[in-house]
Amino acid sequence: MGRVATAQDIPVYPPPAPLDTAGLGKSDAQTFANSQVVGMGPSKGLIVKYERIPGNFSIRSSGVGGVPDYRTDVSKNANLVIKAYAPLLNHPHLKLVLGLNYDRQEYQFREPATSDQYGLYGNIENKGLSIIGAQLAVIRPVDAVHWYLFRTKTELNGDYNSDELDINNYLKVTSEFIYGWKRSSTFAWGLGVQLGYVLGRQSIYPVLVYNRTFNPRWGVEALFPARVLVRRNLSPTSLLFAGYEVVSNNYNLKLRNTFPTPNNPAVRALELRQIDVKFRLRYEHELLSFLWTGVEAGYRYNYEFNAFDRTDNTRDRIINSQLGGTPYASLDLFIVPPRKLLQKAERSRK
């Protein structure tokens, strides 16, 4: 998979009611459960985000089995993300949400490697790293307490251009199942498993959802181990978050020029596994009744940026790399259901 999509990336329609500042107990009675709690931000329908890591930071690569080492600085690292979510079915007992996403990550290096130095970074710089994906989420409220969610996602991840896209060479598939309990309008949690690429290679990972609003100002939104955020409700139209997120990417690369390794005289395809831990401070604010903005800043620690021989599916590790830690910043705009539409939906349920 590319960038990890989690259960909390998927909006639940209609979104939770606004935070009850007069008394949290008044809205506890709910007919159908879900993972959302009062106080959480509005559901996102369309998201456009641009992230940039300023300044230069190092990259250090150690070849395995005779592959040469390589060191340089990254002069640019930018990421554009576009996501869209739409409800296909919004029944009280069953909700289907379709999601589409496009990511493009770009690198520029001070001294790109030549073809005789395995050409990994030259390949990335010239073509960029792209993700095109689609997902379907099935959200099933069983009763007033129990709920479950199933999500499957397919993505095309790699350094392809539009004129050379080969689905078989770039396809990644992930799935997720979570079963949860809605204890009150302020507390929901769940347990599940994910078949994905959280730690680089495709494996089965445990998932813990923990969403809780403690009082009119403070709450926690977590999908452990991938993400934990502490939420501060500054006002009905402003939220502040602080915490961490594990961001994993898995790209397939098709090299222009082959290079030799001890186990393969002509490496022509690589699998690049990138794992970052981001320590985040995020602010969200309503601009219009249907339009919000998000500003985020933090520090990125790179855990892994390793390449594996994907020629004939041998999967031998041939390059060990790590990016230098560095601050980052991002800006995004997202469209939410208009307030009048939510009020109308709330009246229709009563």
Image: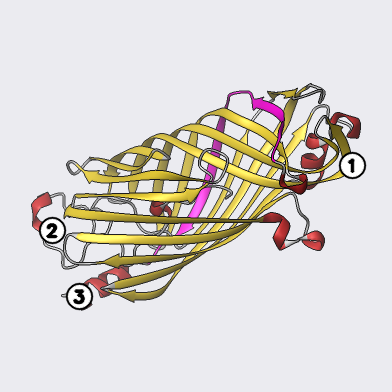
Q: In the shown orientation, is residue 285 left or right of residue 22?
A: right
Q: Say which label, 1 or 2, has the lower sequence index.
A: 2
Looking at the rendered structure, the secondary structure element under dot 3 is helix
Tell me if label 1 and label 3 are in contact, CB under 8 Å.
no
Q: Amino acid at mark 1?
A: Asn
Q: Residues within 10 Å of mark 1 (few under 14, many from 20)?
A: some
User: Gap in Å between the C-alphas at discs 2 and 3?
Assistant: 14 Å
Residue to which mark 2 is pinned: 27
Q: Is residue 329 magenta?
A: yes
Q: Amino acid at mark 3?
A: Arg
Q: Quadrant of residue 34?
A: bottom left
> Closer to the camera, 131 or 85?
131
| Label at residue 145 | none
Residue to which mark 1 is pinned: 257
Q: Amino acid at mark 2?
A: Ser
> Closer to the camera, 54 or 300?
300
